[in-house]
Amino acid sequence: MAILIIAEHDNNILKAATLNAITAASQMGDELHLLVAGLDCNLVAQQASKIAGIKKVLIADSEAYQYQLAENMSKLVTDLASNYCHIVSPATTTGKNFMPRVAALLDVAQISDIVKVVSENTFSRPIYAGNAIATVESLDAIKVITVRGTAFDAAKQSDLSAPIEIITAVHDAQISEFVSEEVAVSERPELTAAKVIISGGRGMGNGENFTLLESVADKLGAAVGASRAAVDAGFVPNDMQVGQTGKIVAPDLYIAVGISGAIQHLAGMKDSKIIVAINKDEDAPIFQVADYGLVADLFEVLPQLTDKL
Amino acid sequence: MKILVTVKRVIDYNVKARVNADNTDVDLANTKMALNPFCEIAVEEAIRLKESGTATEVVVVSIGPKACQEQIRTSLALGADRGIHIETDSMPESLNVAKLLAKVVNAEQPGLIIMGKQAIDSDNNQTGQMLAALLDIPQGTFASKVELIGDKVHVTREVDGGLQTVALNIPAIVTTDLRLNEPRYASLPNIMKAKRKPLVVQTPADLGIELKTHSKLLKVEAPAERQAGIKVNSIEELIEKLKNEAKVI
Ligand SMILES: Cc1cc2nc3c(=O)[nH]c(=O)nc-3n(C[C@H](O)[C@H](O)[C@H](O)COP(=O)(O)OP(=O)(O)OC[C@H]3O[C@@H](n4cnc5c(N)ncnc54)[C@H](O)[C@@H]3O)c2cc1C
Ligand SMILES: Nc1ncnc2c1ncn2[C@@H]1O[C@H](COP(=O)(O)O)[C@@H](O)[C@H]1O
């Protein structure tokens, strides 16, 4: 049987997280189908059809799917599910929103945030803020799975194009509607896709001081992240939060500045290749996971870092 | 309007979970347990809605072993009116939890069901969405703001790209994010008063639900530990190491 992957996109661009989910799915089976549900999302379907391993793209184009509302998406996916043995999506806020609904409608479990495919029915996933890794075997006929992007490489592009099939069924539950959104616009790379990240914590003192991090980020082509404390204090918006309950990142280089290293923060970044910590408290727990630690006042050393890079 | 709040008993968020010796689970013996932080926020939100006159009654429900009653009492001390404990031997899987909760919702008919977005033990982030699907009602997940406007509930959601606001028909499910509110502390008199608030105990059989097994936990392992590296003395030394040793810049 085939595997259905649900694409993450904004009706124009296929989001990188989809590519990691495709790689995970390719370890569960060969017949990979990708569903693009949105409004005027033909461009996304075109991009999707050129990903290596994808045998077929399904496009469901309707106002009902413009914002990928969970109430509508779940009905669409459930409607398609009988042809599939696995339903897979990235563990992004969109995937986390509608996938459990799909599972419940199918009367099966969801296996959330997998980091390893052991076999077609067995998967590993972090629990307890990443302090334990559980290996679970699914006993359900259809496996509903969300994928942690950092744990899988991105699927490659292909020279061939997979066929695109149109899904005409429209599922509009009419119980929820989109009102508005405040989308953070940034010239910088997306946090979950960045090779280098510099994050600030409560030690930054206020939002303006984040410009000190931005200057370093400009030199390194880095994304800027934050701890929950920095978000809660109102220094920066929530989409910058790294951690157990924010974004999970694993860049080549993660620089934590004025961040103490609470378990919830570590859960979101400890799989980074190289970790640098800058903190004035030499006993801060962040130093226990840092490859390079610098005990210093961030206000003194960040300008030096910008200058010397 | 009645509000139903779900509360889960979990490991205290300050405690680091340890895997047991035979790699079958985490070892929770003698571990400090607490109300899941996101559920605490859910209780707080419900109480605020009651204080502002929007809600009339706040009912909390917890599913699991007898000890869960501690977390129900904590919620009652914070201001909830009554509790329901659905007693099971161990913590059921999310879909079973959702099925049990669906029965409670049908019996109680709340206008709003407020849940945590995630239990910090399972890290599943799915039970609220599952319950919404079983009841065929809308959901506002990862909420940082909840407002009743006319006959709808407007929920501002923390999403990857920023914030999104949706309007939902009532009844609806809201799952909380950390910024929704800052929970209060229970006062001593309220802790005493909570002991006398009603708490009923039911079993899955009472609700007509048979718990199904959807997955098997094969093993639980500790993650690869990171070793602490070295301390550098200056920015120059740091840049030199990143360039020549780690080769990441
Ligand atoms: C359910 C739950 C979920 C959570 N999820 C997350 C999550 O996803 N992500 C997350 O990050 N947190 C999360 N948290 C919060 C977490 O527990 C910590 O409170 C938070 O990570 C602390 O942030 P911080 O390190 O910036 O602040 P603090 O712990 O206050 O640390 C600030 C650090 O800055 C240093 N500092 C101060 N001034 C300077 C200076 N001038 N120069 C250098 N260093 C300085 C201090 O020495 C200190 O180490 C969660 C909490 C709960 C309860
Ligand atoms: N056993 C339980 N009893 C009561 N509420 C629960 C239980 N399990 C999960 N929940 C609720 O569902 C939310 C999400 O849990 P989860 O999907 O496991 O991450 C929690 O924050 C609780 O509000």
Image: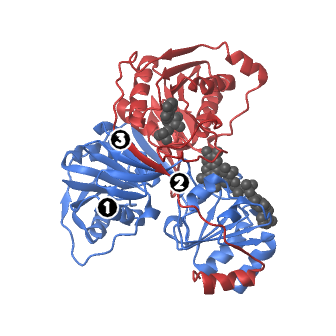
Chain colours: A blue, B red
Q: Where is residue B244 drawn, in percent x and y?
A: 62, 87
* Element type where label 2 sits in the image: loop
* Element type where label 1 sits in the image: loop
Kindly identify which chain the residue marked by label 1 belongs to: A
Q: Which residue is mark 3?
A: B215
* Quadrant of the picture in which ligand 1 is shown: bottom right
Asked if the residues shown at circle 2 and circle 3 are in contact, with their CB atoms under 8 angstroms apart, the answer is no
Q: Is residue A308 left or right of residue A178?
A: right
The residue depicted at 34 percent of the width and 70 percent of the height is A155
The residue depicted at 38 percent of the width and 28 percent of the height is B99
Depth-wise, is mark 2 or mark 3 nearer the camera?
Answer: 2
Asked if the residues shown at circle 1 and circle 2 are in contact, with their CB atoms under 8 angstroms apart, the answer is no
Kindly identify which chain the residue marked by label 2 belongs to: B
Q: Which residue is mark 2?
A: B222
Q: Where is residue B235 drawn, in percent x and y?
A: 74, 80
First in sequence: mark 2 vs mark 3: 3
* Element type where label 3 sits in the image: strand
Most foreground residue, A48 or B203:
B203
Residue that lies at the very extreme toward the front in this rendered image? B22
Instruction: Identify the amino acid type marked 3.
Output: Ser
Q: Which residue is mark 1?
A: A41
Most foreground residue, A243 or A129:
A129
Residue under disc 2 on the same chain as residue under disc 3: yes
Residue under disc 1 on the same chain as residue under disc 3: no
Most foreground residue, A249 or A182:
A249
